Image: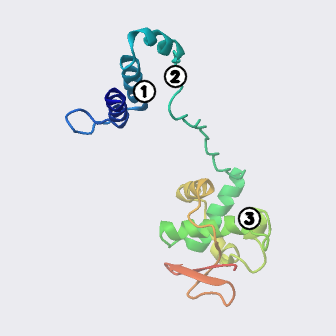
Amino acid sequence: MKKLICSLLVVVMALTGISFSGKAETASAYEAADTYEAVVVNSVKPAEKADISADMPKERAPAVEQPVVEETVAAEPEVPSVSQEEIELIALCVMAEAEGECEYGQRLVIDVILNRVDDPHFPDTIYDVIYQKNQFSGMYGDRITRCYVKDELVQLVREELESRTNYDAVFFRTGHYHSYGVPMFQVGAHYFSSYD
């Protein structure tokens, strides 16, 4: 009986990682299993060792099956197909509407144009959005005759096509918010609003 209790105690100690010194040691599942096999085989009479060894599996499966992790690659955001002519038209509109504004304010004007193209409440082409009646007043009259396409603005348009600064603003006005739309924020002289 003492042998059985001692054997069980040794097995428990081996499986829990407790050494004879009384300190706990960490053991992997494989180390614990190896120790368990050694204890079981060594605690049995020599005549029975061959039988027990024969019954033990030669290769062990992992103690815990590791989940298979599938790598998913995030899809690149789809960049809208915009012609060079349309890019230059947006840049010209930004020059007419926001020439004196900071770069951030100019980016927001670009975004208003792009957001309107995406919004079902507005025309669905860049040209039609910019030339929609009573919109982008800088594109009419004397102001437009003094404007030209600047390389810096073309670059800003390209960057905003890749990743917009804002996806909600569809209105802006100088001096105060429109009487329609939901006021969002002010940048420079422009007050930006969303549709809802």
Instruction: Say what amino acid the circle numbered 2 marks.
Output: Arg
User: Mark 2 = which residue?
Assistant: 60
**From mark 3 to mark 2, how far is it between C-alphas?**
59 Å
- Please give left or right for residue 71 compared with residue 179 in the image: left
Residue found at x 28% / y 36%: 18
Q: Nearer the viewer, mark 1 or mark 2?
A: 1
Residue found at x 53% / y 16%: 55
Say whether marks 1 and 2 touch (CB < 8 Å): yes
Vertical position of residue 1 compared to residue 176: above or below:
above
Q: Residues within 10 Å of mark 1 (few under 14, many from 20)?
A: some
Q: Which of pointers 3 and 2 lies earlier in the amino acid sequence? A: 2
Name the residue nearer the viewer: 156 or 196: 196
Residue found at x 52% / y 12%: 54
Q: Secondary structure at mark 2?
A: loop
Q: Nearer the viewer, mark 3 or mark 2?
A: 2
Vertical position of residue 17 compared to residue 54: above or below:
below
**From mark 1 to mark 3, how far is it between C-alphas?**
62 Å
Q: Give the percent coordinates (x, y) of residue 169.
A: 63, 73
Name the residue nearer the viewer: 184 or 62: 62
- Which label sits on residue 118? 3
- Which label sits on residue 33? 1
